Image: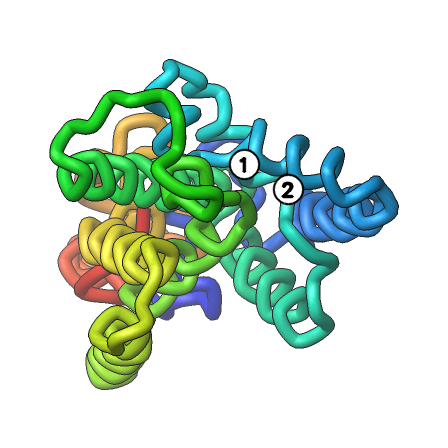
Amino acid sequence: MGAREDGTVGGRGAGPGARRGAAPWVTPLYVGALQIGALATARLPAARRTALLRAHSTNVANLRAGRWGTLATSAAFVEEPLPVAYGAALLATLGAAEVRWGTARAATVFAAGHIGASLLVYAGLRARRGGDARPAPRAPGDTAHALDVGASYGFYATLGALAASLPHRGARAAATGGLLALGAVPVVRRGRTFTDVGHLTALVLGVGMGAAGAPVRGRLPATGWRRPRAAASTTPGRSGAVGTGPAAVHRGAGSAHGGIASPRGVV
């Protein structure tokens, strides 16, 4: 039984309602909405635009005040219109994830990386400030009130998950190691920012989700558990066996043992 190009094997793991292999539709809508929104906010007066972005930022001030909705809304805004190169990379990465895993799982990876990295960065900043609960910033450029919006955390998490789910072991190791090294470079430099740490955190979360292996290893869509191993199959696309005789049973059982295209998969 051969593996399909999307990393799934002969239809395993494609549960009811799965859209793996279909053309992405949420990704272009999302990236297009980001760009249109950025162009619209860029036309606002500077003070109003800053206030709007700050209100939807996952900064310390907002999260400390219990504005947890910013964990979702921050991914719907960007500070500036997307450059062509970044917009293309975002479209390609999220689109590839949507094609490979289906819309729901691709969105889950993106959301988990975005929210997880935002919360971890928030926890780190709070710890660095020693639990400071003062509502006012220490200075006009205080990190607690910084603008922190955009799709980059989810983008990095999705990129890491895609790298960690490549079918070929060597390519998977090279891609994962290369991305982690590139993500670590801004963090070790002297002028690093908390967003540099957030990007690396999101990348690590994505690699972890990819290593955990949920959607491309033939697991049940709703639970992530493996499907029960079948003793035989009469469907050529699943086991390569035609008929129900002993030889077909043997071939079907062999496919159940060797039917995993990749030793590691993705969420």
Tag 1, which secondary structure? Answer: helix
The residue indicated by pointer 2 is 77
Residue 87 % position (x, y): 67, 65
Proximity of marks 1 and 2: CB atoms separated by less than 8 Å = yes
Q: CA distance from mark 1 to mark 2?
A: 6 Å
Residue 111 % position (x, y): 43, 38
Reply above or below: 103 against 212. Answer: above
Going 21% across and 74% down the picture, which residue do you hit? Answer: 188
**Which amino acid type is marked by label 1?**
Ser
Mark identifier at residue 98: none
Residue 222 % position (x, y): 35, 27
Mark identifier at residue 74: 1
Whether residue 150 is visible to the viewer of this picture, yes or no, is yes
Reply above or below: 68 against 219. Answer: above
Going 37% across and 24% down the picture, which residue do you hit? Answer: 63
Using residue 160 as the reference point, say whether residue 130 is left or right of it.
Answer: left
Going 71% across and 47% down the picture, which residue do you hit? Answer: 34
Residue 76 sits in quarter: top right
Residue 167 sits in quarter: bottom left
Residue 54 % position (x, y): 57, 34
**Which amino acid type is marked by label 2?**
Phe
